Image: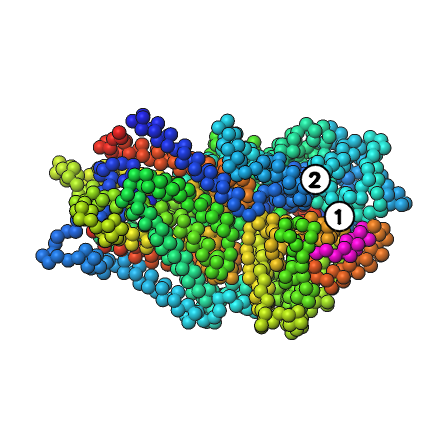
Amino acid sequence: MSDGRDTRVTRSISGGSVREAELGTTPDAAWPARRARAESPFAQGVRRLRRSATALIGAVIVALLLVVALFADVLAPQSPIASDQAHTFERPSRAYPFGTDQLGRDMLSRVIHGSRISLAIGVSSVLLALFVGVPFGMIAGYYGGRVDSLIMRVMDLILAFPIYLLAIILMVIFAPTAGIIGTIKVTGAIAIVRIPIYARLVRGSVLSIKEKEYIEACRAVGVRDPWILLRHVLPNCLAPIIVTTTLGIATSIIVEATLSFLGLGTQPPTPSWGWDLKANVAFIQSNPWISLFPGLAIFVTVLGFNLFGDGLRDALDPRLK
Amino acid sequence: MRVYILRRLLQIIPTVLMITLVVFVMMRSIPGDPVVALLGDAYTEENAIKVRHEYGLDRPILVQYVIWLGKLVQGDWGASILSGRPVLKDVLARLPVTLELIALSMVVALAIAIPAAIIGALRQNTWADYAATSIAMFGVSVPEFFLGVLLLLVFSVGLGGLLPSSGWVYLPGTCQTVVCAAGLWGNTQHVLMPAVALGVGRAALLTRLLRASMLEVIRTEYVTTARAKGLGERPVVLKHALKNALIPTVTVMGLQVGFLIGGAIVVETLFAMPGLGTFGIDAIIARDYQQVQGFALVTALAFVVINLIVDLTYTFLDPRIRYA
Amino acid sequence: MRTRRYLPTLGSALIALAALLAMLPMAAEGQAPKRGGILKVAYGNEILGMDFYTTPGYEMAWVAMNVGCGLVSITPEGKFIPDAAESWQASPDGLLFTFKLKKNVLFHDGSKVDAAAVKFTFDFVLDPANRSNMRQFLGAVHSVEVVDPLTVQIRLKQPYAFLMHVLAVYRMGMIIISPAVTQKYSPEDRRAGKPEALVGCGPFKLVEWAKGTHLVMDRFDKYFEPGLPYVDRVVIRTIKDPVTQMAAFKAGEIDFIADLSADHVDTMRAQSPRAQVMSGKETTPMVAMMKVTVPADGKPMSKDRAPHPIFSDIRVRKAVACYGMDRKEIVKIAYKGAATPWAGIIPPGTMDTVDVNHVCPYDPAKAKALLAEAGWGPQKPLTFELMTNTEKSVFNVIATVIKEQMARIGVTANIKLVDKTTWLVTSTQDGVFDMFVEDLASLLTVDQNSYLSASTAAWNHSRHTDTKIDDFYARYAREMDPAKRKAIAKEFQEYSVDKLYWNTISGSPFYQVAQPWMKDYVYQAEFKVVYKKVWLDK
């Protein structure tokens, strides 16, 4: 599982070969000047992306997931929460392609609706971390000094927690609930754990271009700081942020599933892949399908995001190829 | 160098203290305290007040923290409110289990990552490369507990119980209880499935990292020079590329160990292992404050100490790096 | 013609064979128990501590009843049998109980179990400073006196029909503690499981308790029943996950699962067809308890009570919990029919229980009508929170079915899943809740339930204030005539289901699973999990 944690590398060692092997992109990536006509890095990136088979597969999976999640109500043949006591523990059949669980609920519908929760939590937790972490990272990197020190101390503190310890304690404090509130709580808990990743990432990028001449020039001319941050600093961090976000979604989905496994994630009857996996695993001997399908759903989704994120990374930083 | 180590060791202290303080405060924000569970059937308001006073639970949070800290510097980690058992003793009994699990998980991860990375670097962009990275990618997309369950089903329930489903057999010498099940073979049987379940997920990142670093190094000058000297390709790759690729790998491994310390919770729960993971989660759920503090302290310490070791290892791996 | 000569031989051979075959079943029955071996037991929950008299939870009690001995014990049929006491008698007025102790009962440290030790035990339990969880059951005890070294007398304040039950089973049996050892060691030593501090007179002595790893007990060679126990050692491990439990069982790593969760019984039977799956009539109720009063000033456990906004109205209670819940459907889905749908406060397997299911037939139309009468309906929709905890997966299944059933009568139930500790705190500390689903304590007698449902009980979850309930319990406990007691019990259960302060859904079945080679274990629900007569046929 890769995430921005690897930018820690630059903190312990100043310069040297280690930095080059750093995973995220460095802002002054030297785009190879192969073409006679200058092509924007973005277009080059897209071109590379299209060439990569794995990235395409990942993109297809992600797109499929989005479609399923958006149109869950239409796609799901039955209600995911309506129980039918006459048809409990059904094996996969025409009527119930994924079988039914202990309460007679159609697993196919549950898996389809579960995509909403997984996607919602995965995406929103990462976005939340992003919207909180990036500004902090920019401020820390740009202004430096005590502000930097303070912010990074807090980030270090969060990072020093073993991820699950923090998530577990947070969820026990928040008290797992069902419905929207429950989803928000899980999102918050996972987001808190991921904020430092973005902060560090952005701070690293900011530090490296802060001293550049044209930034000095901007300042000299009188351009205001926030504008500088937005217009010049941010675009250069964009690539690693995108990559980290995509991969972060994958991680978040797994963390949510694990929290559900421990009984601390989204609560029933909200359909959740992690919960279904955990609840049905005990019956795996008599009816393996009902836990297998949610598990596969998690696997395929996470795989999709990982492949896509990987492809993005390769496309945006050709130096790694 | 020695100054640097000393400085880092001193820096550990405030970090660890902050973590324990945060955990302390967080635990007391959770509704419920151990007193209800402690008194059980004998619960009455007056008993509860008496017991809370006995254990100092009615004092301000910061005062309680300072008291805990005071005992800590004297080497007393306190005793569990619920069971009365000394925390340090239990932590030490559980530590070897989790340490072994983590160490072996990393071995499993490296066992997958190193060959995959070498294949990937040497046969870049061929089907072999894609296959190798794909395998690693699959591993990272499966939640540990699902993999654990699958392993359990295949090797424990199926295949005539090839591997034991739960419990623990200690490595000779590490057992702290009076009645000990110890033995190398038994230990291997018990640690294999959990280590694989936990380690497979780590392999992807390591594969990518190693591969990227190796590719990086392959292009640099001194490898070209080595080739020019007439050395075969394989020794060149293995000796120089791998060695240099180890640096970022070691860093990331250090971070992954931090993740593993907490992530072992799930695997340990599934395989009913007497390690720190189960210790921690049982303590959190039971609101056993002292045990949670012990758990937080040992994991925070482990995390920062491992990072320090990782940083120090750089000097051995890359002679170009020196510390002020 | 030649065959005729062989006929007699053949005939006698057949007769001999028949005789031999006839003897085989007798031989199997009279199979002599084999001595030796290690019994490996799995618990589904952690042992919380080892102090016999203050630690809550079944798991500790199941250890205590093997490490300790009491005055009397009880058979599954309800007959009292001697334990450390060889005989006993009650005075005609029922106020004086005299127990004669066996001569050869010893504590694990070799000291004698005598009347002084018994008196010490009672004094210890009755002393409020020791915060013993048995104290509440001995409310009727006035004093305990030593008559001679082997005779002890218990004097009661008023007639109490259940003293023997208290000694045999409440909190799983009152075990005798050693005065010397108890005074020498502290409560922390006992709780932490120090073997020297936990000396009893039972068939096994505690060797070690490593929390989270194992608990080990060895045979006590000087146990007063000669020849017992058969096994050398018992090792108890906690395996929480049922998949792991069943895998360990199938692989033969454990011999006995002390408490298999009901939803996994079918899987267990399928995986291990030769396993002995043991169960019986349910003595534990599965309840959907409604809160009836709330603290008037907002302070938990306040004496000033205000009505609960929803469930203080009996019409709402009846609509939701009596006519609005299809108990048969719940049992079918949650237990696959392997439990008894039940509306009465006393579980189906408990002494003097009465079937009052006819008082609460499933009738959604009637439920809706009652709700309308109470002012709830489409203009004022009823919504409440249904709390349950994560200790057993079946709680959640039941809560989900109840939610469905509520929807049918136009009521919205929102499920709130919390961990066990939070549930315990909320339900017993007068916390905020509307209804919860849980299974409570296993009951041998109606009397035992007074600690859970009397208006003054600390564990009166619903916080009802009806003292008539308390009167029933008091009359029941004082009535010495079993027939009259039964009548009181019947009246009580009918009254209780009519008022519905306590809402039972079904019995909660209790399952234990043993390997085919584990012989002579006697199933006695949660009351007795003892290994002294168990032997391993290996």
Question: Does the image show residue B21?
Answer: yes
The label shown at residue C378 is none
The residue beneath circle 2 is C132
Is B308 drawn above or below residue A58 in the view shown?
A: above
Residue at the far front in the pictured view: A222
Secondary structure, mark 1, is: loop
| Residue at 69% from the left image edge and 52% from the top image edge | C304
Q: Are marks 1 and 2 in contact (CB under 8 Å)?
A: no
| Chain containing the residue with disc 1 | C
Q: Nearer the viewer, residue C522 or C200?
A: C200
| Residue range highlighted in magenta | C463-477
Is B64 drawn above or below residue A74 in the view shown?
A: above
Residue A44 horizontal/vertical position (percent) = 18, 57
Residue at the far left in the pictured view: A36
Mark 1 or mark 2, whichever is nearer to me = 2
**Type of amino acid under label 1:** Thr
Dot 2: within a 10 Å radius of its alpha carbon, few (fewer than 14), some, or many (20 or more) residues?
Answer: many
N-term mark: 1 or 2: 1
Kindly report the secondary structure that dominates the magenta region of the rendered protein.
helix
**Type of amino acid under label 2:** Ser
Residue C19 horizontal/vertical position (percent) = 73, 52
Secondary structure, mark 2, is: loop
Check the picture and name the quadrant holding the N terminus of chain B. Answer: top left
Membership of A189 in magenta stretch: no
| Chain containing the residue with disc 2 | C
Q: Are marks 1 and 2 on the same chain?
A: yes
Q: Nearer the viewer, residue C77 or C193?
A: C193
| Residue at 66% from the left image edge and 73% from the top image edge | C369
| Residue at 35% from the left image edge and 31% from the top image edge | B8
The residue beneath circle 1 is C75
Residue B226 horizontal/vertical position (percent) = 15, 37
